[in-house]
Amino acid sequence: MGRISHHYTSCLFQIIIVGLVAFCEPGIWTALNNLGAGGNASPFLNNAANALTYGLMSVGCFLAGGVTNKITAKWTLFIGAAFYTPYAAGLYCNNRYGNQWFLLLGAALCGIGASLLWASEAAIAVGYPEEEKRGRYVGIWMGIRQMGPLVGGAISLAINVNTAHTGKVSYNTYLGLVAISSLGAPFALLLSQPQDVIRSNGTKIPYMKKTSLAIEARAIWKQLKNKYILLLIPVFLAGQFGTTYQGNYLTTYFTVRSRALASFLTAVVGALANITTGLVLDLNYISRGARSKAVYLIVLVFVTAAWVWNAITETKLSRMAEPPAFDLGDGPFFNSAFTVYMFFKFFYEVLQTYIYWLMAEVKGAQGDGDIARTTGILRSWESIGSTIAYAVGATHWSNLNQMILGFSLWGLTIPFTLLAVFGNWNVGGEVDVGGVEGAEDVEGRADTSSVETERVFVSHDSKL
């Protein structure tokens, strides 16, 4: 029994559970969106629903870090997961009956739930692991999340394998995904509270024991002025533009079964990208600074290459009198148009794993519940970017213009991220304290001196 209890409270178990919740909720949400619009065979309604979801998240994520500190990450994650399922049900009703109001209502509920889930899952995934294992655990979390598109793509591919035309997928596809989405909240109940989690190196996880709205408001404002966080905002803000354009690209130019195959394969390459990047980020014979710089340079080169390839392909497609309906085995142009989608998805997931790892490296944001606030702030900016991206996608703006906008925004992120990675901004703010202490404010921060927290000593000499 003792061994079972130890595994249940291990850090790895918590990451697996967060990954399973992510699989059932944002993972399945991604699978649903990969299939395109629910009932109208058009991306516009789907993008409008997504714009509503992310619009609510733009505000909600700012506040969700404080909620996480108040009611704990476990219960924040549970509530957030429960609010996802109506969106999946709304897509089913839209597909089968043409109902639009329920889809928009589900999108609004999803926006509230996702605000809570995004902040809490990221806080657990980057805040619970030991420093020397953070990369692989972030990779595991994001890799398990990829199983949502994998399962969704497999279900869709099996049901729609003979659907060699563009348009809506079978409504039976959505029934299976609604069922999976309903499992997210029960999985969240399996999480342990941070004070009960046992790290392999024996250290404790910092957590909030008592807080208030005033304390959270002051602490969030403090993190908003953190120079390192300010430098990371552009890459979080602009990152989602690529996925929005890619969704419209897939829906416009590919048949139903081609989209189903793409959803399946992108989950495979995405999981591979997440796990591989996480392992590279944990290589302990290379300094953390060198790892960070090397991985970002790789990301910079290959994401830029993906955008260039996308630009060439989209330019050719936009010059056609009628958009093609690419189906499996349609020749060299299909192969190129399909492969660039996979190439982009792989390196986008490399980027995602890297920036979440980078988020946890923010100094001056590691104590007094700040990791929850930091993830909430950055994911809020991510949501703002997504809101704008999906709002653009909900218009009749051409795919070519959407591609140009996304590529341009990616270019704008580069100087800021280079400054964050190569500059000397990430200094100060982290104090090592021997043992576990109570409410004494060892860092002398007047604005959070009333907060009772657990503080830990993290050994930087621990080996894998």
Image (tube, helix red, strand yellow):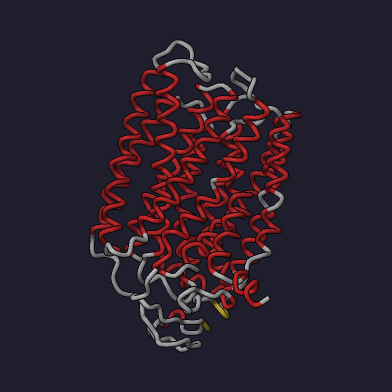
From the image, which quarter does the C terminus lie in?
bottom left
Residue 235 image point, x, y percent = 37, 49
Location of residue 122 with respect to 103 vertically, above or below: below
Taking depth in this image into account, of 401 and 190 the one nearest to the observer is 190
Please identify the quadrant where the N terminus is shown. bottom right
Tell me if 239 is positioned left or right of 6 in this view.
left
Instruction: Indicate the position of residue 313 as horizontal and vertical percent values.
Output: 37, 23
Residue at the image position 35 percent from the left and 27 percent from the top: 311
Query: Residue pushed farthest right?
Result: 97
Q: Which residue is found at the position 69% from the left and 36% from the top? A: 174
Q: Quadrant of residue 32?
A: top right
Residue 429 in view in this figure: yes
Q: Is residue 239 above or below residue 367?
A: above
Tell me, yes or no, if residue 420 can be seen here.
no
Where residue 61 sits: x, y (%)? Answer: 53, 57
Residues 373 and 10: in front is 10
Seen at 60% across and 49% down, the residue is 23
Q: Quadrant of residue 282?
A: bottom left
